[in-house]
Image (cartoon, helix red, strand yellow):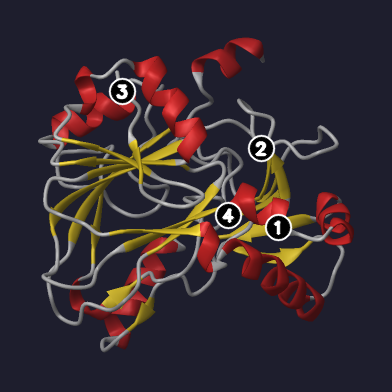
């Protein structure tokens, strides 16, 4: 298999016209670890093909811990910008539980004529960009991630936004994760923060917000961000352990529909070897389980 074509300065590569399910898994995974984000142009997959592709990397999660799935497809989350509710916040998927997804796949069904891109940021490059004193400081920090915050803000319909928030927080989670996560396959360090990280352990709310804003600014520096311009049928695979993503609300009332399938992940580990722990909520085993190899190790 030839190497995918790099499309960003620090992250991102793409395949054109390739069936993702026909490519060797080991080579795809090697490319993903190198590029963080793989874009499969005109992948030609339906729901079953997307599920089959994602499941090559390990057990799948359900669609979401609280949000309903696509009807009849319990492992597929619909990502829609309908009715004026847009979750345009930088985040890593589902970090409010102890075992966030390992990988995420997004497949474009309906895309706007203009706008509606997805931005994906490299949190390992952000960590490397930190001045040494900030890196040493971040290495010692832990952040509380929660789903109990205004993740999706209303554009025009406050009632719909309130209804969505009620569903999103129907089970409340708070989990402490290391601010600097060690990647389990490469050993790289990355800033493991994003929108669900709402407070730093041992610090006040004001102190937490100021420090998290400072660190987050390194994640979203333009040189660390890839912009994915969607075409119908495109599939994007990204490493949820070492990236963040954001969907700009810049497409007005145009329809935009993606389907998301995620692969079950492990427990994040910090630079000291300590692991994430639950503060509030359950272990989300209705949504995800530890990967097979981790479950056997335990």
What residue is shown at x 50% (from left), y 15% (from top)? 292
Q: Is residue 41 left or right of residue 199?
A: left
Q: Which residue is mark 2?
A: 268
Identify the disc placed on residue 191: none
Labels 3, 2: front one:
3
Q: Check the image and report above or below for 118 versus 24.
A: below
Q: Check the image and report above or below for 232 versus 87.
A: above
Of the image marks 1 and 4, the number of the one nearer the N terminus: 1
Q: Neighbour class for label 2 at 10 Å: few (<14), some, many (≥20)?
A: many
Q: CA distance from mark 2 to mark 4?
A: 16 Å
Residue at disc 2, secondary structure: loop
Of the image marks 2 and 4, the number of the one nearer the N terminus: 4
Labels 1, 2: front one:
1
Q: Check the image and report above or below for 225 versus 77.
A: below
Q: Is residue 243 left or right of residue 139?
A: left
Q: Which residue is mark 3?
A: 2
Q: Which residue is mark 4?
A: 173
Which quadrant of the figure contains the N terminus? top left
| Contact (Cβ within 8 Å) of mark 3 with mark 2 | no
């Amino acid at each position: 298999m030839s190497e995918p074509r790099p499309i960003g300065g620090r992250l991102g590569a793409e395949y054109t016209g390739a069936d993702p399910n026909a490519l060797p898994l080991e080579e795809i995974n090697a490319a993903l670890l190198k590029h963080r984000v793989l874009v499969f142009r005109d992948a030609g997959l339906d729901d079953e093909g997307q599920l089959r592709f994602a499941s090559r990397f390990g057990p799948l999660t359900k669609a979401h811990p609280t949000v309903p799935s696509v009807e009849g497809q319990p492992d597929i989350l619909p990502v829609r910008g309908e009715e004026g509710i847009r979750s345009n916040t930088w985040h890593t998927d589902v970090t409010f539980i102890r075992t966030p997804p390992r990988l995420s796949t997004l497949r474009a069904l309906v895309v706007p004529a203009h706008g509606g891109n997805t931005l994906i940021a490299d949190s390992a490059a952000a960590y490397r960009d930190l001045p040494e004193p900030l890196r040493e400081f971040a290495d010692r920090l832990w952040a509380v991630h929660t789903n109990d915050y205004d993740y999706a803000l209303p554009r025009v319909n406050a009632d719909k936004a309130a209804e969505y928030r009620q569903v999103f927080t129907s089970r409340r989670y708070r989990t402490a994760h290391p601010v600097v996560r060690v990647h389990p396959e490469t050993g790289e360090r990355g800033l493991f923060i994003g929108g669900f990280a709402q407070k730093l352990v041992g610090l006040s709310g004001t102190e937490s917000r100021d420090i998290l804003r400072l660190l987050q600014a390194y994640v979203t520096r333009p040189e660390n961000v890839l912009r994915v311009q969607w075409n119908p049928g495109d599939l994007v695979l990204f490493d949820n352990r070492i990236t963040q993503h954001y969907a700009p609300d810049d497409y007005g009332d145009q329809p935009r529909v993606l389907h998301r399938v995620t692969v079950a992940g492990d427990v994040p580990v910090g630079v000291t070897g300590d692991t994430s722990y639950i503060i509030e909520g359950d272990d989300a085993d209705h949504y995800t389980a530890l990967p097979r190899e981790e479950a056997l190790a335990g």
